[in-house]
Amino acid sequence: MNTSFINRLITTNAGFAALALRIPTAIIFIAHGAQKLFGWFGGYGLEGTGQWMASIGLEPGYQLALLAGSAEFFGGIALLIGLLVRPAALMLSATMLVAIFSVHFVNGLFMTNNGYEFALTLLAVSISLMFSGAGKLALDNVLKQRLS
């Protein structure tokens, strides 16, 4: 793979603002992914989440639960440690778009009605990180130094 492409992918001048977005967002994504994958934190695990996804027309449910849970869990870990933040944020953005339009949009904006406000916020943060990169205290910065 072209090292100039990788350098552009991991380079960031975002400072501490991106870190302030990364950490809490990563915790939220890791927890939601763990619910889907492992049944932790009151989640239903892959079987239950897959059955629910199939019941709302997202087929094949199990595989989509695996994809969504993996995107959230491993993408959240990537945000937390600041490794390949832009691709992780892209993956998380796509996951939030699917969540918004397949589950929450019909319920309106507010969370009290299972609306899309929370997923929209996570989408906005993910898009912001996709543009800004990891910021300070990130493994992307270590990787960039090693590649230079």
Image (cartoon, helix red, strand yellow):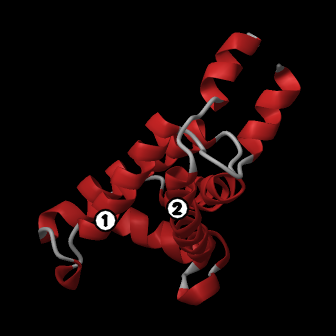
| Relative vertical location of residue 112 with respect to residue 37 in this rendering, above or below | below
All told, the count of numbered labels is 2
Look at the image and tell me whether residue 94 can be seen: no
| Relative vertical location of residue 110 with respect to residue 33 in this rendering, above or below | below
Residue in the picture at 72% in, 39% down: 140
Give 101 or 82, whichever is nearer the viewer. Answer: 82
Residue type, numbered disc 1 = Ile
Horizontal arrangement in the rendering, residue 130 relative to residue 69 (left or right): left
Residue type, numbered disc 2 = Ala
SS of the residue under disc 1: loop
Look at the image and tell me whether residue 18 can be seen: yes
Earlier sequence position, callout 1 versus callout 2: 2
Give 128 or 61, whichever is nearer the viewer. Answer: 128
Q: Which mark is drawn over residue 56?
A: 1
- x and y, in percent, of residue 88 in the image: 58, 44
- Which residue is outermost to the bottom? 42
Judging by the rendered image, the residue that carries numbered circle 2 is 20
- x and y, in percent, of residue 32 in the image: 53, 72
Residue in the picture at 52% in, 71% down: 28
Residue in the picture at 59% in, 87% down: 41
**Viewport quadrant of the C terminus:** top right
**Viewport quadrant of the N terminus:** top right
